[in-house]
Image (cartoon, grey):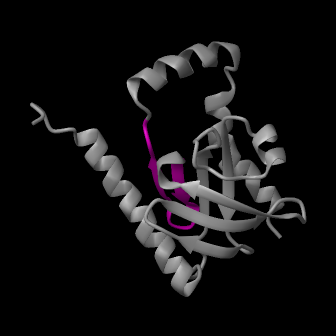
Amino acid sequence: MSKSIDYGNLMHRAMRGLILEVLRAVERDGLPGEHHFFITFDTRHPVAELADWLRERYPEEMTVVMQHWYDALHVDEDGFAITLNFGDSPEPLYIPFDAIRTFVDPSVEFGLRFETQESEDDDEDEEDEDAPAIRPHQEAEVVSLDKWRK
């Protein structure tokens, strides 16, 4: 038996449960009103499925937008499958909930950020020295993706 309560993991599980419920409602009923999602996920996650060219272009993380056009949304207990359009090329993806780093619905100014473990943070700090634009780019992605809306 553990000698302490792991609030971090309990909170992450609850937040992923919220995403699961939201996506199941969208799977059943579609996106209501102006709701849309920006979902950033770790493309290195062993269960994440994406085309090789997408993995090459986004070797660490990728932000996808679920808004006007998406197809074949299927949600299970571990993640969701969806087909999204990348430059007029529909591509199927499978995104495990454990791979999600941020989930944002800008229509209602709602967002979740999943913090990584300390050991991963140490690795990221080393990577940040080589690529200092990673964190600002994450925030800029939400704004820059608007230019692709139709």
In the foreground, 22 or 145: 22
Name the residue: 72% across, 68% down: 83
Q: Is residue 36 above or below residue 103?
A: below
Q: Quadrant of residue 18?
A: bottom left
Decide if residue 33 is on the left or right side of residue 130.
left
Q: Position of residue 16 (x, y in %)?
A: 40, 56
Residue 114 is inside the magenta segment: yes
The residue lying furthest to the right in this view is 88
In the foreground, 126 or 144: 126
Q: In which quadrant is the C terminus drawn?
A: bottom right
Q: In which quadrant is the N terminus drawn?
A: top left
Q: Position of residue 105 (x, y in %)?
A: 54, 62
The residue lying furthest to the bottom in this view is 29
In the foreground, 51 or 120: 51
Name the residue: 9% across, 31% down: 3
Name the residue: 69% across, 26% down: 133
Name the residue: 48% across, 17% down: 122
Q: Position of residue 64 (x, y in %)?
A: 68, 56
Q: Which residues are magenta?
A: 100-115
Helix, strand or loop: magenta stretch: strand
